[in-house]
Every structure is written in structure tokens, then in C-alpha cells.
Image (cartoon, helix red, strand yellow):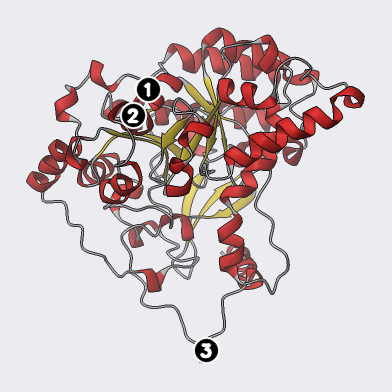
Amino acid sequence: MKMEDMVIISVDDHICEPPELFDKHLPADLLATAPKLLTDKRGKNFWSYQGMKKPSVGLNAVVGRPFEEYGMEPTALDQLRAGCYNVHARVADMDANGVAASLNFGNSIGFDGATFHRAPDKKLALRHMQAYNDWHIDEWCGAYPGRFIPCGILPTWDMDATVAELTRIAAKGCTSVYLNDNPTKQDLPSIHNAYWAPMYKALADLDITVCIHIGSGNPAPHASMETPIEAWISTMPMSVAIGAADWLQLEALWKYPNMRVAISEGSIGWVPYFMERADFSNWRHKTWTNSLFQNVKPSEMFKKHFLNCFIDDKFGLKNIDEIGEDNIAYECDYPHSDTLWPEVPEYLWESVKNLTEVQIDKVTHLNAMKWFRFDPFKHHKKEDLTVAALRTQAKAKGVDLTPKSSGGARPDDGTKRPITSGDMMGMFKSNADILAEA
């Protein structure tokens, strides 16, 4: 196999939601009260909904910009590559990147559904969340069948509504949902509470995959406000282990053998030790902890129920036998700062070229197809979805890959000191202050 022969499915990318998101999916009265993308007097975009204001974009949408412009900018859609918010431009960027298909989380409105969870009027929030799912499934994913894996969000503040929405979106062809890895952060019961039992049953009955994404319920901690921001960013993927350990202890995994959990944007290098440690802890403590794991090792359950997703992880792939070749899938993370667009095939090939062809096919696309019940070959010939074929299409479309400056280099105060976690939190605060003035 050559690099150009790979078929790549990315199981974690993002959308900067466009202002017209709700236009085709709500009647006039509900559209009037739906989230709105507005612009403040400084030209920064923000989402406004039920008295709440939320900054848009930031470090999660810097694809195609020079590295020196990375930061909490850009803050307006017109500063972004069109592929961040326009599905046609997104597919063109996927072609240029040699990516055959993609699962897309939201950025501001649809990442973990927090906008709707925090809304005081939950009746309206339910209808608007349903409209978001309709837009995502029908308009975004539906524009290019076989190129996107639909992923819904749920009104988990109401369990009856959650089960109903699961049933509704499954009928529309949605095979995955995003769930907060720690719903106690949304003032809901923990994942171990009986509150969630109807949802777990519905997920199993409808054969839907759960995605738990880094950065929501259990965000990566930072040691202090003076900690250089690189330290914080370095540990972000590993912090997902907190949620993974919690979900591994879920009783529903024993009740529903087909339940599947994808650990999104978490990397894989930490997984072998995580499983080893889980087995060791179980061996030493199961006699007094009333552990679920009496005759089965935690590592065995982890391999059965959890998909591990990586962006760039040579160390993890060197340990593929420990992780399991059926439990790894690739992710591009477009348009976030970690994305390797438009050179994903080049970087990925360096990581996988020493694997067997069977293993390469599994980690690049077959595992994604299996875990998300998704088959792009129902809509496209396999030979049309290879890196070589897609890049030929992109060239024909004239996709411009030149880095584009949209804000200039970040200000230099002359000290050359490292940017700290406190600086980053200050940038968040600055955005909040601006919203207060909007």
C-alpha cells in the first residue's frame, strides 16, 4: 500500500455554526426565538439565546492561518476559511486533505448542547435543539451523502424527551450522539444514576454510538494561572482518561453488550498504561470495593466497548497490539489548532506505514465504519475515496491551500515570556467583557 491508496475517515472534526442554521428548520414564531449569531461593536461574533451570550470561534477555528496568528482569535466568521461553516467548502477542503468522510461536532451551539441546557425556557430549548439536529443531519450531512457521519445532541435534562429524540434522529439515519462525559457539570445526575437507564436502553435498542469529547464535563486542568499555556495544552488529551475511567465502570456496559463509546480527541498513547493500571487496581481492591469486575478484567471490557481516537500519535500506534487494532480510529480535528490539514495523509502515513495493510485499513477507515455503523461505499466507489482520487478532485476545483492571514501577528509586549494559562483565561474574560458591552 502507498500513502495515496489510503481511505481516511476522520471521526472528530468541528463546525463553526453558520448564522442561517435554523432558517429552514423552524416556523416563523420559533425562528424568532432561536439562537442568533450577532456582531458586537468591535466586529466580534457571538451567539445570543434566551438572555445568554456566548463568544464564537477562537482557537478552535484557526485552520489555514499562520502559526504566529494562533490564539483566541479569530472571533468572526469572515476571518475563517469558508470550510469552517460552509458545507460545500468543507467538502472541498476534505478533498484537498484526502479525507473521505468526517464526523462533525459543533463548536459554539452544538458541541455539547450546553447552550440549550443552560436556557431557562426548556420547552423552547427542546424545539431549537431538535432544529439543530435537523440542520446537522438533513442539511449539513445530507448535502453530501456518504461524506459525513451524523452526530446528534440530546435534551438530557428531560429523559422522556431524550428517548424520543433518540428515536426520532435514528429514524433519520443518525448513528451517533454526543454526551457530556460528566453530566454533573450540567446539574444532572452522574452517569451511574438510575436516571439514565431509559437512555442507555434506547442507545442499545437503536444501535447508536456515544461520543464523549474532551473538554466539556471534565476539562483539562491547569496547575496555576502562571502555568505556561503549552503545559495545559500538552496534557489535554490525557485528561480524557478521567471520563474514560468513569464510563468504564458503567453498569450499563454489562447489561448491553453492543453499547459503544468513542473517546473523541483523546489520543491513544496513554491507553496501554490506563488498561494496565485499571487491571492492577481491580486486582488489589475488588474484594472490598464491590467491583463489577470480579471475573472479567477492566481491560477486556475497555477493548470491547471503547473506541480510541488519535490525531498524531506514533507512540500509540507502535503499541497497537496492546490497545487493540479494532479499537483505534483516526481524527483530523478540522478546524482546530491541532489539525494537520491539509497534510493529513503525509503525517498519518508516517505513523502507520510500518503497520500491516489490514491494520492500516482498520485505523484509517474500517474501524470508523464498524463503530459508527457507517458505510460510505453505499454512495461512492472505494477507488473514488482514496487520497489520490480526492486530491485530484480538489485540484480540479482549484482549492487554495495557501496560508491566509486574517488578523496579523499577535501583539508583542517585548518581554518574550511564555503565554500562561492565566493569559488564556484573561482572553476568555476579555471576550465576556466585550459581550457585556454588545
Measuring from the top left, give residue 33's x and y in whole percent. Answer: 55, 38
**Distance Cα–Cα, label 1 vs label 3:** 49 Å
Label 1, on which residue? 369
**Distance Cα–Cα, label 2 vs label 3:** 46 Å
Measuring from the top left, give residue 225's x and y in whole percent. Answer: 70, 71
Q: Quadrant of residue 272 in the image?
A: top right
Q: Is 394 displayed left or right of 135 in the figure?
A: left
Q: Residue at x 68, y 27 (%)?
A: 248
Q: Is residue 29 above or below residue 316?
A: above
Marks 2 & 3, CB-CB < 8 Å contact: no
Q: Is residue 143 above or below residue 399?
A: above
**Distance Cα–Cα, label 2 vs label 1:** 6 Å
Q: Is 79 displayed left or right of 428 in the figure?
A: left
Marks 1 & 3, CB-CB < 8 Å contact: no
Label 3, on which residue? 413
Q: As shown in the figure, which amino acid type bears the numbered disc 1?
A: Met
Q: As shown in the figure, which amino acid type bears the numbered disc 2?
A: His
Marks 2 & 1, CB-CB < 8 Å contact: yes
Q: Is residue 422 above or below residue 111?
A: below
Screen quadrant of the N terminus:
top left
**Nearest the eye: 374 or 311:** 311
Q: Secondary structure at mark 2?
A: helix
Q: Secondary structure at mark 3?
A: loop
Label 2, on which residue? 365
